[in-house]
Image: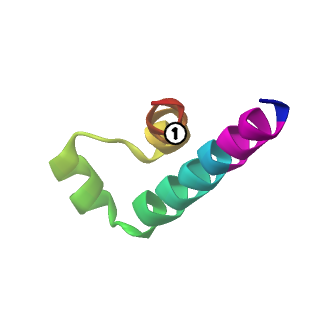
Amino acid sequence: MFIASIIAKVQSFLRYRETVRELSKLSDRELDDLGISRGNIEDIARHYSAA
């Protein structure tokens, strides 16, 4: 169970990093089309990775 918890946390962190990386690649125009500001990327990634 302890190992499963560690694996879940690592997977969550990897999802967070990937989400930040992919959203950061988008232009301001593309982010605006999605209703996201550049300053919200980390919050959105944190929320997504926790799901």
Kind of residue at disc 1? Ser
Residue 17 as seen in the image, left or right of residue 37: right
Quadrant of residue 4 within the rendered picture: top right
Residue at x-position 57% and y-position 48%:
16
**Dominant secondary-structure state across the stretch colored magenta:** helix
Q: Which residue was labeled with disc 1?
A: 49
Residue 31 image offset from top left, x and y in percent: 28, 53
Q: Is residue 33 above or below residue 4?
A: below
Indicate whether residue 4 is drawn in magenta.
yes
Q: Is residue 16 above or below residue 48?
A: below
Q: Residue furthest right?
A: 2
Residue 26 as seen in the image, left or right of residue 14: left
Residue 40 image offset from top left, x and y in percent: 46, 37
Residue 8 image offset from top left, x and y in percent: 66, 40
Q: Is residue 29 above or below residue 5?
A: below
Residue at x-position 22% and y-position 39%:
35
Residue at x-position 72% and y-position 48%:
10
Instruction: Work out which quarter of the rendered image holds the N terminus and state it.
Output: top right
Magenta residues, start to end: 3-10
Q: Is residue 24 above or below residue 11?
A: below
**Front-lying residue, 22 or 7:** 7
Q: Residue furthest front?
A: 1
